[in-house]
Amino acid sequence: MNNQELTDFLKECGVCQICQLRYLKARGSEYQDMKESFEKLNVKLTIPDDNEVLSKKSRPNPCSTCLGLFSEEFQQEIIDKITCCNIDQFDCQQIGIALSMPMLLQIRQLSMWFALMKKFGSKIDEERSPDVPLKEAAKLILNPIICKKLNKTYNSEGILINVFLDHPDEENDVAKLLKVNESVFSMKNAKGKKQLITRAYMEKMFIPSKLSADTFAKQFEVPCPIPNSYLILKEVTLAGPCVFVAGRYRKLSRKLSHSPWVLQGKRVMEDSIQEIIIRNIAKHFGVEEGKIIFSSSGREDVDVRCLGQGRPFVLEIPNSKRMTLPKTLAHDIELEIEKSASISVKNLQMVLRDDLVHIKTGEEKKKKFYRAMCVIEQPITVEVLKKLDLPNGFDIEQITPIRVLHRRPLLSRPRTIYSTKAWVDEQNPKILIIDIISQAGTYIKELVHGDFGRTSPSFASIIGQPIDIIALDVVGIDLDWPANVDNSKLDENEVNGNGLAS
Ligand SMILES: [Zn+2]
């Protein structure tokens, strides 16, 4: 079987020139100058070529293997439909394309595979398909054309263009496919569910090495007949890229929960950190608030402030209308959030999906930095201060505090207190300020008062008298991420950039 014999046979079967090249295993640019490619492959185009067919008034029959997918008319139809979707709503220069093809295309490839085996015998492999698969060819042929027409570059992380194709014979052919090998589809998959007909499954199970040509031929013509109808472009949908925005927040209120706090259907706190941040960011990315996912490196109790450099957080924003976050906009958002008076945000910036590992790993190993305001019954003595001045720290054993027992399992955990340092409040001799560096997961309130001996040792047991906590602040988070950026100062290239001045 030489290239000429193969091409002539395909042409007889009503296969278009692009698909002929697919069966000649053409790659990349070889689909662009087809005449040259055929020449290189020593193929003479004898039987009426496409130009002759096109000169006839009526539209020719569609290709028997791609059903017109690679015809110029169809390419134009796809591009027209994408342009109708208002792709300009996305501030994004990159596109990815996902083609959803009807199953009958796959059946037709299989039919042609059987036909080639019948014609050329053992020269055709029965394990590996004789053509460049349609999906792959579509990527090589359609993607560059669509990108060029839309003036975008290809990137699967960009705007996703979903192209849904259909064909009038689809239902009929799938029903016949079931008859070819019903037992395959009644098998249960790994999850115990009935196997659905998917492309991947078909590519695995419906190949000549696993299916007899006779069984297939009972349901389908071999080679596949010349079709009457073209593929139908059913629908085109667009989905914006998924982007990630990180920053650090400071919690300035002692009456603010981390996420919406609802008890028995009623809100306990009016607002939350998560809602304030999302509310101020969602609108700039053209995304519904409910679609954004907020996560932070740990959290603090409702009545605990978080000061210092603030706590790192990240937002996952799906179907985003924008791919960049200019500093001017980031700064505007920071100022807006500050108006809430309960939190402030800085270092707001776009990050990559890969950066999320910073926020998701090693939480338990991190050090926590606190400042506690505590009170004792008598004026504080030098002796008390000395006992609480522990630069080398100590280890404690902490049984789940009574106050969280209703939602946490009863356990005893060892925790390390890395250091403590105390001093007397200037205004009140009974008030102590204590700086604490502890292992993540330590209950600080219980470390102070001892929780009826459930935390041991505690500050109460160390100084040998009752001590209570009035207020607690987080003053540092042991995570050097995201990068420190000052959005109030523009970089030189942003000052000179376009469309950023406001
Ligand atoms: Zn074709």
Image (tube, rainbow, N blue to C red):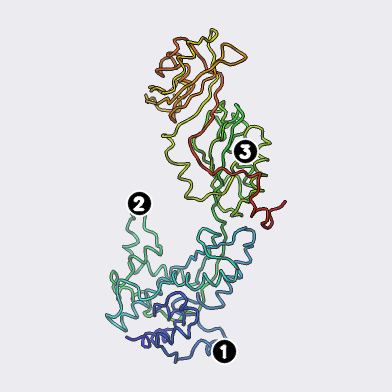
Query: Which mark lies nearer to you, 3 or 2?
Result: 3
Answer above or below: position of 400 versus 68.
Answer: above
**Alpha carbon distance from label 3 to label 1:** 64 Å
Residue 47 screen position, x and y as percent: 45, 91
Tell me the amino acid under the disc marked 3: Ile
Q: Earlier in the sequence, mark 2 or mark 1?
A: 1
**Alpha carbon distance from label 2 to label 1:** 54 Å
Determine which residue is flagged by label 2. 191
Q: Nearer the viewer, residue 365 or 221?
A: 365
Q: Nearer the viewer, residue 88 or 483?
A: 483
> Which circle marks residue 55 in the picture?
1
Q: Is residue 412 left or right of residue 261?
A: left
Residue 301 screen position, x and y as percent: 53, 28
Q: Nearer the viewer, residue 496 or 167?
A: 496
Residue 289 screen position, x and y as percent: 60, 45
Q: Secondary structure at mark 1?
A: helix
Residue visible at 50% across and 72% down in the picture: 168
**Alpha carbon distance from label 3 to label 2:** 41 Å
Tell me the amino acid under the disc marked 1: Ser
Tell me the amino acid under the disc marked 2: Lys
Q: Is residue 340 left or right of residue 28?
A: right
Query: Which mark lies nearer to you, 3 or 1?
Result: 3
Q: Secondary structure at mark 2?
A: loop
Determine which residue is flagged by label 3. 276
